[in-house]
Image (spheres, rainbow, N blue to C red):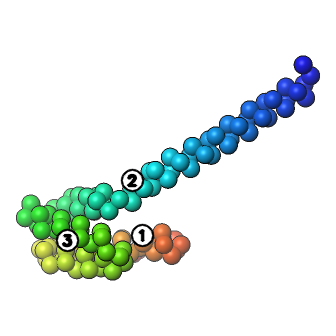
């Protein structure tokens, strides 16, 4: 077999691998994004994050859980600000100070993701 035929077969094999890899990456990525974007999963992650970062009591966490769940079913921007205002009502003064910083981080993240702005160093 000549060198050009071997080269042609190797090129075809390489291209088949590239196409297969691209298709698999697209399918797997789509499934992962759908899993991440589920409102229940997002609400659970947000609640756990608040519980950890704000050292919420069990009573606070129990009150905040439904607020977050309800907020995930509304429009994202409006829900987030409404949800944050309702959460703030359940916090102690010390927790409210930390929560303001968390809100700034949220806003910077949303701006960077949806407005294509780079995240700022000092949100």
Q: Is residue 117 left or right of residue 12?
A: left
Q: Residues within 10 Å of mark 3 (few under 14, many from 20)?
A: many
- Check disc 1 and report the residue beneath it: 109
Q: Give above or below for 69 relative to 81.
A: above
SS for tag 1? Answer: helix
Query: Quadrant location of residue 11?
Result: top right
Residue 27 visible in rendering: yes
- Check disc 3 and report the residue beneath it: 67
Query: Quadrant location of residue 99?
Result: bottom left
SS for tag 2? Answer: helix
> Which quarter of the figure is the N terminus placed in?
top right
Q: Is residue 82 left or right of residue 12?
A: left
Q: Give above or below for 42 relative to 2.
A: below
**Residue 57 at what x, y percent from top left?**
10, 62
Taking the spot 23% from the left edge, 66% from the top edge, the residue there is 69
Labels 3 and 1: the sequence-earlier one:
3
């Amino acid at each position: 077999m000549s060198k050009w035929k071997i080269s042609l077969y190797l090129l075809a094999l390489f291209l088949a691998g590239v196409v297969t890899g691209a298709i698999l990456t697209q399918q797997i990525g789509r499934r992962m994004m759908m899993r991440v974007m589920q409102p229940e999963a997002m609400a659970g992650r947000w609640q756990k994050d608040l519980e950890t970062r704000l050292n919420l009591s069990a009573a606070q966490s129990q009150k905040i859980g439904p607020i977050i769940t309800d907020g995930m079913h509304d429009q994202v921007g409006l829900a987030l600000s409404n949800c944050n205002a309702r959460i703030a009502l359940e916090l102690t003064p010390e927790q409210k100070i930390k929560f303001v910083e968390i809100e700034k981080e949220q806003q910077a993240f949303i701006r960077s993701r949806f407005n294509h702005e780079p995240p700022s160093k000092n949100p």
